[in-house]
Image (cartoon, rainbow, N blue to C red):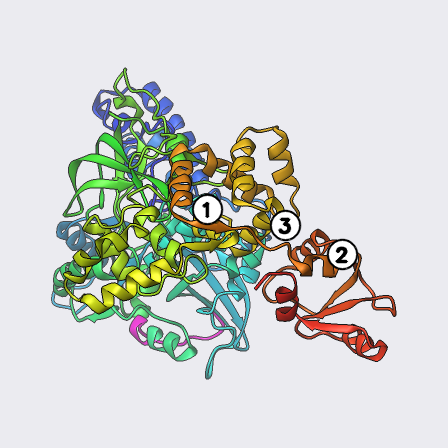
Amino acid sequence: MAGARGRAAGRNKASGADTASETPIETLDEAAAAAELARLALEIAHHDRAYHERDAPEISDAEYDALRRRNARLEAAFPALIRPDSPSRKIGAAPAGGFAKVRHRVPMLSLDNVFAESGWREFCARARRFLGLKPEFPLSFVAEPKIDGLSISLTYEDGNFVRGATRGDGTEGEDVTANLRTMKKVPQKLRGRAPSRIEIRGEVFMTKADFLALNSAQAEAGQRVFANPRNAAAGSLRQLDASITAGRTLSLFAYAQGEASESVAETHWAYLARLRKWGFEVNPLSRRLASEAEAAAFQEEVGLTRGSLGYDIDGVVYKIDDLALQRRLGFVGRAPRWAIAWKFPAERAATVLAGIDIQVGRTGALTPVAHLEPVNVGGVLVARATLHNEDEIARRDVRIGDTVTLQRAGDVIPQITGVVLERRPPDAVPFVFPDHCPVCGSLAVRPPGEAVRRCTGGLTCPAQAVERLVHFVSRPAFDIEGLGEKTIRAFYEDGLVRSPADIFRLPAREAEIAGREGWGALSAANLVQAIAARRTVALPRFIYALGIRRIGEQNARLLARHYGSFASWRGQMLAATTVGSPARGELDSILGIGPAAAEELADFFAEPRNVAIIDELAALLRITDPPPAAEDQALAGKIVVFTGSLETMTRAEARARAEALGAKVTDSVSAKTDLVVVGADAGSKAKRATELGVRVATEAEWRELTGGG
Ligand code: IVH
C-alpha cells in the first residue's frame, strides 16, 4: 500500500487499528458507512501528509494499513458510496510547497501487498487468468528485496542526468535534481550507449550505519532525531538547501523504468543488467526465478538474511520478467498487475514501559533507556529500548506504565515509536528527568542549547572515573610516566586508585604494586619516582588535569594567568557559582573564556564533591603560581597584524588572545606594526612586513610567544 512503509507511531491519538475493528461492517447502514468513509478519507489524508510531506508519521505502519483496509472493506460493501476523494484512488500525497513540480509522464505506481504464500498464489493465478495462460505455461519472475526508502525518478538526456523527482502523488512529484546531484550513487552520466531520453527509477535509502551515525550527530547537536532510516532518507533528500543533503550519506538501488525514447530490453532481468552497465547499483540479492514455485524459498532465504543486511527491507518485490507480458497486464487502481510486494511480518510490537533507566556514559552524558515488559519483535525478545534524550521523552510524553509501540529494524537498537494513549493508566505521571547523576549523585546539568544533560562529578563518578583518571595523568596534565590507560583501569578495578588523590597515595603501596602480575620491584620503584616527580605542579596543568568540559590547555592557562594563584582561583570560582555575583562577572569578562566555558566552571564548582577532590589534591601537592610572564609585558601596547589562515585557532580567538595581552590588532601592515603573524597561504602582507623590516612570526611562534604552547 502506498505510504505504508516505515511509518512510526507518534504521540497523537492513534485511532487506527482499534477503531478499525470496532463496528462490524455488516451492521452498518448506509448513513453510518458514508460517515465513516468521510472520516477515513480525512484521517488517511492527514496521515499521508504527515508521512509524505513532513516525514513525521504519527501512527505505525500496521495502524495505517488497518485504516486503509477498513476503507477498502467499506467500499467493497457499499460501492455506491465510494467518494471522489477516496484514499483508494490516491497514491501518496501532493507535493509539498517549496520544490518545483514535475509531472511524471508515466505514473509512478505503488504496489499491492501480500503477507503469506496464499496471497502470492492468488496474485499469480490472477495474472494467469488475465493473460489467459494455462497453468503449464512457464511464468518467470525477478525477485528484488523491497527497501524501505523513497522512490525517485531520474531522467537522462543523451546520457546526462537532467532531472530527478520524488514520487509525490504518483503523477506529480517534487523536483529534487539539485539534491540528487549531491549523491555519489546517482550517475551524472550514463556509461555506454543509452536511448536519447530515458527515465530510471529506484529507491533512495539510508543504511543502518549511516542512520545511526546521523542520529547520534543530530542528538549531540541537539537537533531532531529521525524515527527510522526511511524518515532520515526522506528528510535528507527533501531539503530545500541541497548542501544539507550533501552532508548526509544516501544510497540508491535502481529497479524500474519510466518513459524511454526506445526500448532497451525485453525482460526485466535484462533491463537490470543494462542498469548496471550504465553505472547504477542494482540490489545484488536480486534473483531471476524460473517459476512461481521458487518464490516461497526465496522469500524465506531473504527473510533469514534480513537482519544481517546493512539496510532495512520490509519484504520482497516479485515482478513478472517478460516486459511484453507486463505491458499486457497493465495496472489497476494504483498498482501494477505484474508485480506484488510480499511483505515480511512486521517487526513491530506494543508492550508496557516498566521503567526508565538513566545510563551515564564515559563522558558523563545521561541517556534514558526504556525498561520494557519483554516482548517479541520480529523474532527477537526485546526488554530495553533507547529513548535518546530528555527532549525525546517530553516530546513523545512517554510515561512509566504506558503501553508503547516499538520497532526494530534489523540489528538497530529497538526504538519506541509512540504511546497508545487509550491504554494509559489513570495515575501515569510525566517522567521527570533527574537533575542528579544516578551513579554518583553529583549535579547533572544541561547547558543551554544542548540536548544532553551531563553529570558534573567527572572526577568522582564511577561511570566516568577511568576516562577522567586517564586524562588526569596524560601528558599535558600531570604527565605521569608509566600510568597508561591499561594500568589505570586495572588499578581502578582493584580499588588502588578511585580518585585522583589516590594516585599520590600509591607510593605508600609500592610493595603491593611490585607484587602485582606484570610488575616487579623495579617497575614499581619507577612508578613511585614518576609520581614523586609530579608532586609539584604548575597551576595551568592542575586546572587542565581536572577535565572540566571546555577547559582545555589554552583556557587553563588563561585562568591561571588571570587569577595568579591556586587559592585565588579556587576562591573566585566558588564565588562565581552565584549567578550575577561580581566573581561571575569577572569570570565572564576574561577574554578568551567564552560564556559556555564560564558556565561549565560554575557548574563544576557548584558540586561540593568536586571541591572536595580539589582540596584533597591541594593538600597532597605543591601547586605553583604561573610566573608573572615576561612575555605578557612583551606584547603590551604592541601593534599586531594577522595574515593568512591560522590552523590551530580562529582569527577571532587569536585576536582576543592578543588583546588580552595588551596588544592592538590592526588589519594593515605599516612601519608602525610591531609584529605580523603569518598563517598558511599568507600573501602581500607577509611580503610587505619583510620589506619594511617588521618582525614576522609563524603561528607556532605566536603560540609560544603568548604562552599557548
Ligand atoms: S517497483 C510499478 N521495486 O515500494 C512498480 N518498488 O510499495 C513500482 N520499492 O513505491 C515500484 N523496492 O518506493 C519496486 N525493488 C523494488 C522496490 C520498490 C522498494 C518501493 C517503491 C514503491 C513502493 C511500493
Check disc 1 and report the residue beneath it.
548
Towards the viewer: 556 or 508 = 508
Could you tell which of marks 1 and 3 lies nearer the N-terminus? Answer: 1
Q: Residue shown at 56%/55% (left/top)?
A: 554
Check disc 3 and report the residue beneath it.
592
For this view, does 85 lie left or right of residue 343? Answer: right
Tag 3–tag 2 contact (CB < 8 Å): no
Please name the amino acid that badge 3 sits on: Gly
Check disc 2 and report the residue beneath it.
636
* Number of callouts: 3
Q: Which mark is residue 678?
A: none
Could you tell which of marks 1 and 2 lies nearer the N-terminus? Answer: 1
Q: Position of residue 515 (x, y in %)?
A: 14, 61
Please name the amino acid that badge 1 sits on: Ile
Please identify the quadrant where the C terminus is shown. bottom right
Q: Residue shown at 47%/36% (left/top)?
A: 605
Residue interval drawn in magenta: 260-270
> Relative to residue 276, is residue 528 depicted above or below?
above
Q: Position of residue 667 (x, y in %)?
A: 80, 62
